[in-house]
Amino acid sequence: MKNLLAALLVFSTLSATAQRNKLSDDHENFFRFGVKGGVNVNKITGQSYKSGFNYNYQLGAFMQFNFASRIGIQPEVNFVQTSTEFTNDPNDIYNDIFRDGSQKKSKLNYLEVPVLLNVSIGPSKRVKLQFGPAYGGLLSQTVDSLKTNGNIYKNADWSAIGGLWIQLPFINMGARYKLGLSDINNIDNQQTWKNQAIQVFVGVTF
């Protein structure tokens, strides 16, 4: 009888410890912050551009405010590089603003500020759906063989972001799709240019 009681006591103690560890593992602090970096696979859609994606990079920092057990807000500040290549077809490109020569390319650097809603899915709080708006402020633009000194891209770009975030105890990782909502063509209204990107990243959360 004493052995049975002792065994039950040990079992109860182990079960309680395991339950506390599980709750501790899944517990979300109200405030967390971290950094991340990864690949920005982007393209600019529009008549003047080649189809297909280009590989660039992104670096950033974020904060998490977990207001409820499974819902939170995540504002970020990211440096995002975008590049693209113009089409060879002279009927599709603005001949009056480009010089003659080889294929024209452009590179854009943005300071991007997303504000995302985090929604935990599944029994754990490790996996989160993310979606929300993002504002991109153009820091610099470089275009090959440009005839004019003016900027051919607008300084502001609004987009919608949706993706998946995996939060391990220290490491975070995820993937997102970004759909540009703004026409970034600063030349005229003859063509509509919009950003699109697939972003894959890894980082650390404190």
Image (cartoon, rainbow, N blue to C red):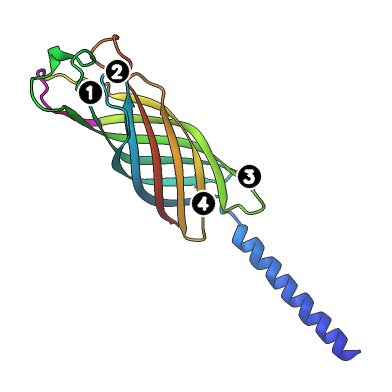
Closer to the eye: label 2 or 4: 2
Quadrant housing residue 109 = top left
Rounded to the nearest angstrom, the CA distance separating label 2 from label 3 is 45 Å
Labels 2 & 1 near each other (Cβ < 8 A): yes
Instruction: Give the residue type at disc 2.
Output: Gln
Residue drawn at (38%, 47%) of the image:
61
Residue 202, position in %: x, y?
40, 52
**Residue placed under numbered mark 4 in the picture:** 166
The image shows residue 64, relative to residue 138, as above or below, that is: below
- The residue labelled by disc 3 is 68
* Amino acid at the residue labelled 4: Ile
Q: Please, is residue 160 above or below residue 99 in the view?
A: below
**Residue count near mark 4 (Cα–Cα under 10 Å), binned few <14, some 14–19, many ≥20:** some
- Lower sequence index among marks 2 and 4: 2
Q: In the image, is 127 to the left or to the right of 6?
A: left
Please name whichever residue, 8 or 177, is drawn nearer the observer in this view of the structure: 177
The residue segment tinted magenta is 139-148
In the picture, measured across the screen, residue 1 lies left or right of residue 45, that is right
Which amino acid, by three-letter code, is at mark 1?
Thr
Q: Which residue is mark 2?
A: 47
Callout 2 touching callout 4 (CB < 8 Å): no
Whether residue 12 is visible here, answered yes or no, is yes
Whether residue 143 appears in magenta in the rendering, the answer is yes
Identify residue for label 1: 87
Inter-mark Cα distance, 4 to 3: 18 Å
Q: Earlier in the sequence, mark 2 or mark 3?
A: 2
Q: In x, y percent, where is residue 172?
A: 46, 54
